[in-house]
Image (tube, grey):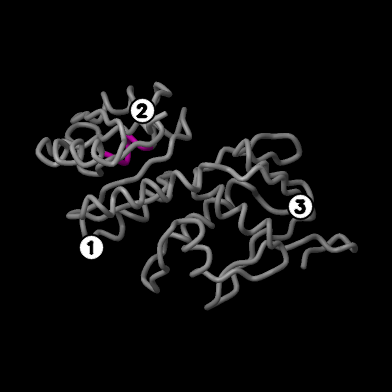
Amino acid sequence: MATRILVIDDDRELCALLADYLAAEGFLSDLVHDGLQGVEQACGGQYDLVVLDVMLPGLNGFEALRRIRGVSAVPVLMLTARGEEVDRIVGLELGADDYLPKPFNPRELVARIRAIQRRSAGSGTLLRVADLELDAGARAVRQEGRVVELTSVEFSLLELLLAQAGRVITRDELCRQAMGRRFSPYDRSIDVHISSLRRKLGPAEEGSERIKSVRGVGYIYLRPSAEGGSR
């Protein structure tokens, strides 16, 4: 079944170009030029991915993303103005899976979409560390039976960290495997996603941190020790 993509952008010329390019790559796309209508369609459950521009008339992209995330975990790729790092960080904090600065090459957009698809496919692996259970096949995370809602990138990062719990994973490795691109020293995406994961998961059962930052290297998911602490 073809991947269905919703493009929410008020630039009609760009939308028409993207529709043609996406069709040539085998994707089905619908175009919406208004934030409110975009939210309504995105929350309908019929799309596999949403491409969302930050600069929209009326309801801007950030508020649109906030409303989408209130009811749906559909992957969202945000289009931001080149050089506006604050837009990218805010978008990630609100639950965007990835971002692409304008202007961009449509080939890069397709590459990002395919990377999100690969992350969302699931491997069937079941991982358990203390009170946390991750089912890669069902793309589900449960903490003491409670479902934890994560974006596709957050899920992929947690899967990598849990699979290698107790081992430091570099930012470059996390960026390549979870986001499908090389790590840049000026790219704060991984840090923002990790911060969101920490907030959603809370501290470990004994009150210690789950995901520890290793300065200048990366992150480690701490395994509980036999004594009740984490290591």
- Range of residues picked out in magenta: 61-65
145 lies above or below 84: above
Circle 2/circle 1 CB separation < 8 Å: no
Amino acid marked by disc 2: Ala
Hey, which residue is sitting farthest bottom in the picture? 216
* Residue 220 in picture, x, y percent from top left: 65, 66
| Disc on the earlier residue, 2 or 3 | 2
Q: Is residue 46 left or right of residue 38?
A: right
Residue drawn at point x = 69 percent, y = 39 percent: 142
Q: Secondary structure at mark 3?
A: strand
Q: Is residue 136 left or right of residue 145?
A: left
Task: Name the residue beneath numbered marker 2.
Answer: 42
Q: Which mark is residue 83?
A: 1
Packing grade of label 3 (10 A; few <14, some 14-19, many >=20) is some
Circle 2/circle 3 CB separation < 8 Å: no
Amino acid marked by disc 1: Gly
Task: Name the residue beneath numbered marker 3.
Answer: 129
Packing grade of label 2 (10 A; few <14, some 14-19, many >=20) is many
Confirm whether the magenta stretch covers residue 63: yes
Q: Which mark is residue 176?
A: none
Residue drawn at point x = 35 percent, y = 30 percent: 4
Q: Is residue 163 left or right of residue 196?
A: right
Q: Secondary structure at mark 1?
A: loop
